[in-house]
Amino acid sequence: MRNEKNSTESTIYDTDSYLQKLVVTNPLQEPVMRRVVLALNLPRGSQGLDVGCGIGLQALLLAEAVGGHVTGVDMSPKFLAYARSIAEKAGSSEQISFQEGGMNNLPLDDDTFDWVWSANCAGYVFGEPLPLLKELARVVKPG
Ligand SMILES: C[S@@+](CC[C@H](N)C(=O)[O-])C[C@H]1O[C@@H](n2cnc3c(N)ncnc32)[C@H](O)[C@@H]1O
């Protein structure tokens, strides 16, 4: 996860088998994630960012919960392609967009989102967490 450029697809793990793991474990994870998302009580119609969105399973839950727009960012083009197909099948393509990028240098403008979500990604940062937190805060609107 340190090397932003393609480390997902080359050195850390095999993308195809990891993708299958995300799909297979989702029925166990989804009820918990759904409850967490609801507990956050995110503002209706808000715009959010899912960092390290993987195949977009939580982006879907978040978009459903807020009825606004969610942008999913991930460094893996393969995961993002799968995420787009899931969102399309769910009829949520209008509500969710996906973008390739690294969380330490987000390809996004300052002050864009109402909130940022990251599950099983930003929390695993190696070393000093402050630069990453600052980068996540950069894209969230003041207040
Ligand atoms: C364990 S998966 C979690 C996926 C999803 N959030 C979930 O919980 O189902 C971690 C994800 O973070 C992505 N990732 C890892 N390092 C990243 C980085 N530096 N920038 C952006 N995405 C990253 C991986 O490609 C992978 O999709």
Image (spheres, helix red, strand yellow):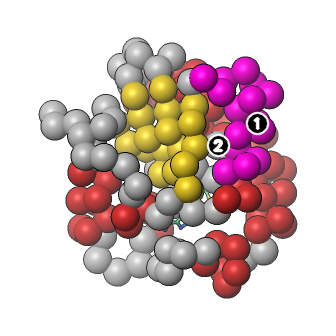
- Specify the farthest residue to the bottom: 11
Give left or right: position of 16 versus 79: right
Give left or right: position of 122 versus 62: left
The residue tagged 1 is 86
Question: Which region shows up in magenta?
Answer: 80-94
- N-terminal label among 1 and 2: 2
Distance in Å between CA atoms under marks 1 and 2: 8 Å
Location of residue 15 in the rendering, given as x and y in whole percent from the top left corner: 76, 68
The residue tagged 2 is 56
Q: Residue at x 73, y 58 (%)?
A: 78
Residue 15 visible in the displayed image = yes
Q: Quadrant of ligand 1?
A: bottom right
Q: Which amino acid is tagged 1?
A: Ile
For the stretch drawn in magenta, what is the main secondary structure?
Answer: helix
Location of residue 113 in the rendering, given as x and y in whole percent from the top left corner: 33, 36
Residue 62 visible in the displayed image = no
User: Is there CB contact under 8 Å for labels 1 and 2?
Assistant: yes
Q: Residue at x 54, y 49 (%)?
A: 99
Question: On screen, 44 above or below 142?
Answer: above
* 35 or 2: nearer the viewer: 2
The magenta stretch spans residue 37? no
Q: Residue at x 58, y 43 (%)?
A: 98
Residue neighbourhood size for the residue with mark 2, other residues' Cα within 10 Å, grouped as few (<14), some (14–19), many (≥20): many
